[in-house]
């Protein structure tokens, strides 16, 4: 099952904890993980909000 198929399955079956674990495991193994901000970053909230706004804009 591809990552996209697994994500789609999980979104349709949110109670399936095994699917969630499999999806999160795949995400953690991706080599190019983008880190928006570290927890100790003083601008953490602002960076997270900006990233959310950017994702919302991209989805329009």
Image (cartoon, grey):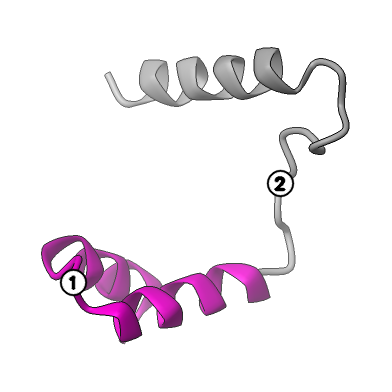
N-terminal of the pair, mark 1 or mark 2, is 1
Between marks 1 and 2, how big is the CA–CA gap? 27 Å
Q: Counting other residues with Cα less than 10 Å from the Cα at mark 2, is it few (<14), some (14-19), or many (20 or more)? A: few
- Against 2, is 35 above or below? above
Of all residues, the one furthest to the left in this rendering is 12
Q: As drawn, is 31 to the left or to the right of 21?
A: right
Q: Residue at x 36, y 73 (%)?
A: 20
Q: Position of residue 5 (x, y in %)?
A: 26, 73
Q: Is residue 54 left or right of residue 6?
A: right
Examine the structure image and report whether residue 60 is included in the region drawn in magenta. no
- Above or below, 49 against 28 in this view is above
Write down the region rendered in magenta. 1-29
**Picture coordinates of residue 36 (x, y %)?**
72, 34
Which residue is painted at 21% across and 65% down in the image? 8
Instruction: Report the front residue among 8 and 45.
Output: 45
Query: Which label was assigned to residue 29?
Result: none
x and y percent of residue 29 in the render?
66, 76
Q: Which residue is mark 1?
A: 15
Quadrant that contains the C terminus: top left
Query: Which quadrant holds the N terminus?
Result: bottom left
Residue, disc 2: 34
Residue drawn 77% across and 33% down?
37
What secondary structure is found at the residue carrying circle 1?
A: loop
Left or right of 53 in this view: 34: right
Specify the principal SS of the magenta part.
helix
Between 58 and 17, the one nearer to me in the picture: 17
Residue 20 shown in magenta: yes
Per the image, label 2 sits on a secondary structure element best described as loop
Which of label 1 and label 2 is nearer to you? Answer: 1
Residue 14: quarter of image: bottom left
Residue 19 screen position, x and y as percent: 31, 80
Q: Nearer the viewer, residue 3 or 45?
A: 45
């Amino acid at each position: 099952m591809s990552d996209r198929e697994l994500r789609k399955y999980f979104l349709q079956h949110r109670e399936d904890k095994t699917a969630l674990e499999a999806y999160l495991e795949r995400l953690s193994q991706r080599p190019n993980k983008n880190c928006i901000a570290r927890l100790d970053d003083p601008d953490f909230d602002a960076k997270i909000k900006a990233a959310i706004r950017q994702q919302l804009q991209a989805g329009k």
